[in-house]
Image (tube, rainbow, N blue to C red):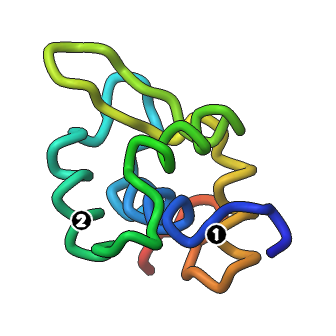
Amino acid sequence: MSCDLPDEALFILNVLYKGRHFRTDAGYHSEKLYKIYIKKFTGRSCLSIEDTLQILMNDGYVAQIRKKKVKYYIADMKSAIFALKSHGYNVVDGRYRKL
């Protein structure tokens, strides 16, 4: 792995990227993220979602918004795109406009 992120962390980055949660006022609800994560990673060998989110926050990829319910968004777009691209995820560079 070129960015030293586990598969669980890359999955969360991909979910946040697909939902276009890039701003501090538009985050992804933690309850929805937990449900999606549990469906994908069920097993003792997988990291818990709290540990995975902590890895992403420590590395600066993701930040959280503290409201009534915690929300998450991508804080460092360049690093997130690089990490997703280097592991084969479908990522669009820059703005994409249909002709």
- Residue 86 in percent (x, y) is at 76, 76
Callout 1: SS: helix
Left or right: 21 as drawn, with respect to 71: right
- Spatial CA span between label 1 and label 2: 21 Å
Asked if the residue at tag 2 contacts the one at tag 1, i.e. Cβ–Cβ closer than 8 Å, the answer is no
Q: Where's the C terminus, which quadrant?
A: bottom left
Q: Quadrant of residue 61?
A: top right
Residue bearing the label numbered 2:
38
- Residue 15 place in picture, x, y as percent: 38, 62
- Circle 2 residues within 10 Å: few <14, some 14–19, many ≥20: few
Whether residue 19 sits left or right of residue 34 in the image: it is right
Q: Can you say whether 39 is above or below 48 in the image?
A: below
Residue 84 tag number: 1
Depth check, front residue: 49 or 29: 49
Element carrying mark 2? helix
User: Residue at coordinates 47% horizontally, 59% vertically from top-left?
Assistant: 47
Farthest residue to the right: give it.
2
